[in-house]
Amino acid sequence: MYRFLLTPRWLALHVVVLLVIPSFVFLGRWQFGRFEERSSNSSLVTANIEAKAVPLGDLVPPGQAVKDDDRFRTVTVSGTYDPGAALVVRRRPQEGQPGYYVLTPLVTGAGQAVLVNRGWVKAGATADAPPDVPAPSAGQVTVTGRLRPSETEESSGIRDRSGLPPGQVLLISPAKIGKGLPYSLVGGYVELTGQAPAAQAAPAPVPAPDVGAGGGLNLAYGVQWWLFIGIAIGGWLLLIRREANDRKAAEAEKVAVKV
């Protein structure tokens, strides 16, 4: 009765099912991996944001880079802004509007400084027109902000290029920005959330990161792919049973006709 399973049409179906099952297993495992990765990242970022503020030097010794595990930690740092080395960072939309981040070195003394992202300003009339940027505070200030690692093309998804207007960059890369400055920059930057004394005029604050659902969608997709395995096997068995029943009924009909 089941010799039909060895016909070319059914052999092709067997091959398809045998290929589909491991593919769905792989896709499910990949989604579960993404779930674990995003959940871990969400937990880390949430814990760092909620952690008590610490001095910048406690997390980043002079000449060292910001560790990935310390991203979004709240830090404090005191110094004076260097307005002559201020920059704006292109391609930084906020609330659906094109604009720039305002980047200013904060000189902490002893030949050291850290880049501070003071906030966001809207774009000028044209791509090459300089935006309207509030001047940084003069004198000694204490900045509180979220610690961020240096940006790269891979981490930001932004491709760096040359030929930009003076005073503009695409990536917040202290190693590149610090060339030619009379002080060394921390290998990362601080995203300002507060300043004392407060500035009279300041760019718009950068929103806190959205930690999302911790990969909940990936978990759902992983379960979905593995459910598809059961559907594929169940559909395959159902087709076999239906074919067998149809052939059995056809045989019974032939016998009845002969009688």
Image: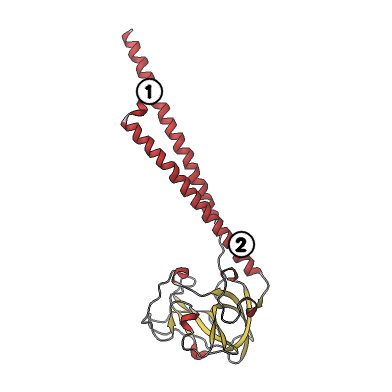
Which SS class for mark 2? helix
Label 2, label 1: how many angstroms apart (C-alpha)?
A: 56 Å
Mark 1 crowd level (few <14, some 14–19, many ≥20, 10 Å Cα): few
Left-right relation of 152 to 257? right
Given the current orientation, which residue lies at the most extreme right position?
52
**Colouring method of the image:** secondary structure
Amino acid under disc 2: Ser
Judged by depth in the image, the label closer to the viewer, 2 or 1, is 2
Q: Does residue 113 lie above or below 22 as drawn?
A: below
Residue 213 visible at all = no
Identify the disc placed on residue 43: 2
**Disc 1 marks which residue?**
246
Please state the horizontal and vertical placement of residue 214, each as a whole percent of the image.
57, 58
Which SS class for mark 1? helix
Please state the horizontal and vertical placement of residue 257, each as a whole percent of the image.
32, 11
Q: Which image quarter is the C terminus in?
A: top left
Left-right relation of 133 to 1? right
Query: Residue, x 36% and y 82% (percent of image)?
Result: 163
Q: Nearer the viewer, residue 255 or 113?
A: 113
Please state the horizontal and vertical placement of residue 52, each as a whole percent of the image.
68, 72
Q: Which image quarter is the N terminus in?
A: top left
Query: Residue, x 32% and y 29% (percent of image)?
Result: 7
Amino acid under disc 1: Asp
Q: Splitting the image into 4 quarters, where does residue 118 fall?
A: bottom right
